[in-house]
Image: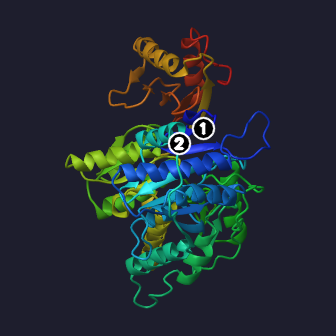
Amino acid sequence: MINIDWEKLQNGSDIRGVALEGIKGEKVNLTNEVMEQLGKSFTEWLKSKGHKHITIAIGMDSRISGQQLIKAFSQGVISQGANIIDCGLASTPAMFMTTISDNISAQAGVMLTASHLPFNRNGAKFFTKKGGLDKVDISDILKIAATKQFTPHAKGGSIEKFDFISEYSNILVGFIRTRVNNNLNFEKPLSGVKIVVDAGNGAGGFFAHKVLEPLGADITGSQFLNPDGRFLNHVPNPEDKDAMSSICNAVIKQKADLGIIFDTDVDRSAIVDKNGNPINRNALIALISSIILEEHPASYIVTDSITSEGLAKFINKNLNGKHHRFKRGYKNVINESIRLNAEGKPSWLAIETSGHAALKENHFLDDGAYLVAKLLVKMAQLRAEKKELTNLIDDLQTPEESEEFRLKIAHNNFAKYGQEVIDKLHKITEAVNGWQIEPNNHEGIRVKCLNDNEKGWFLLRLSLHDPVMPLNIESDIKGGVKNIASKLKGLMSEFKQLDLSVIK
């Protein structure tokens, strides 16, 4: 048996670990041997779900450990009599699509990625035709890996290669052409549009060459399209300030009509308008919500917990939708949207401020490329009317200030201690003049701060995986965040195992 702590490889509904040496204090735990065992375990898990004659499609992002880990995982799969389709460089959404494509007969898809984490990390995301696996499924796979001793299948499986990212790109091209439906230029509906793509040296470079160029777009000035898992230019992450600054500057320099940025494995994205203004986080949610609610009036829009008051007002009042603020975690918002639909409450969009956007029309798959495709369709339609895409969010109210503080927990049982902090803070804030606890809150404690020198809100919650309590504060006035933070820091001084020093 392999002597590691298998549970530490679980990251919610994914697997993540350290695949390479290179960062001090981070010991490799995602070895070739571990990946081979995971290949065997995933195959066994699929068999336990009734699958027979199993074929698994596997792809990877640009990480330099990807090739060796694909080889190891595949060896584990074929040793158990199942087959592998090696898709090479791919995106996470594409690997789900392998399970429903007519041209590839995969019962499951696996994507090797660690999203935006450093070069030495890697991991795996798993899919069946029903969608991405949930947290409990990952736990079951890891239990199999930790306890089962496998014997090689008498016959063994096979490996073949398939360039699926090209097929996936063709799906997006066809979608955009059909939806824009430009009778004058059906094949190239983006002719005359200059678009700069920033893939951050992740897996998203295909979008420029395989999607935008066939549609007629000018992609001159696109940057970091070549896959390079060292990520030497910037972190491939639409939430990262340096990454967003890079794509914003590129749009201005190139005098482009639009900028697009993807994370490493293309399940997240953001855009930049022609003036170099970032459209991410709340603005991105507002933009796609305006499109969805035009197509599906009164739909529930499920978001994570840190969205702004201005966004809620925009969705509920300006768009006549139903904003449903839920928990952080892309699987949380997706599953909540699915739950609402099952209850007869139509919900066509589940989206996190991080850029994870899952649409009901697209199998509730968080797909950064599909999100951008939806925006491009609307952009092309609006250009025909001499309008801009960002006109859709002209009435969105944005906060004057916004800040996140990450408070480290020193307690051994950080989850228990964090909950105690939240429970006690409920009682403390009830007595604060001008502060109102949000009644319909699904995560942590969210408080409106209505005093004249505050005019904002804060949310304190427990991180999904780490011994950290993120504190988000927004205000509609200058100095409001500082005033809220200062008062809150004083009220929380009794929590000795919570590092409040980061609140400046």
Disc 2 versus disc 1: distance between alpha carbons?
Answer: 7 Å
Looking at the image, residue 7 lies above or below residue 378: above
Q: Does residue 164 appear left or right of residue 317 in this picture? A: right
Q: Residue furthest front?
A: 154
> Which residue shows up at 37% across the image and 30% down it?
441
Q: Is residue 109 visible?
A: yes
Q: Amino acid at mark 2?
A: Gln
Residue 267 visible here: no
Q: Which residue is label 2 attached to?
A: 149
Amino acid carrying mark 1 in the image:
Met
Asked if residue 94 is positioned above or below residue 351 in the image, the reply reads below
Asked which quadrant contains residue 402, the reply is: top right
In the rendered image, residue 321, in percent from the top left (x then y), is placed at 30, 51
Q: Quadrant of residue 294?
A: bottom left
Of residue 224 and residue 97, the one placed in the foreground of this image is: 97
Which residue matches tag 1? 1
Q: In the image, what residue occupies the spot 42% across and 19% down?
A: 434
Residue 220's x, y, as percent?
69, 76
Query: The N terminus lies in which quarter of the figure?
Result: top right
Decide which of tag 2 and tag 1 comes sooner along the chain: 1
183 vs 168: above or below: below
Please report contact status of discs 2 and 1: CB closer than 8 Å, yes or no: yes
Tag count: 2
* Between 75 and 490, the one nearer to me in the picture: 75
Which residue is at the front of the view, 456 or 63? 63
**x and y percentages locating residue 26 in the rendered image:** 73, 36
Element class at badge 1:
loop
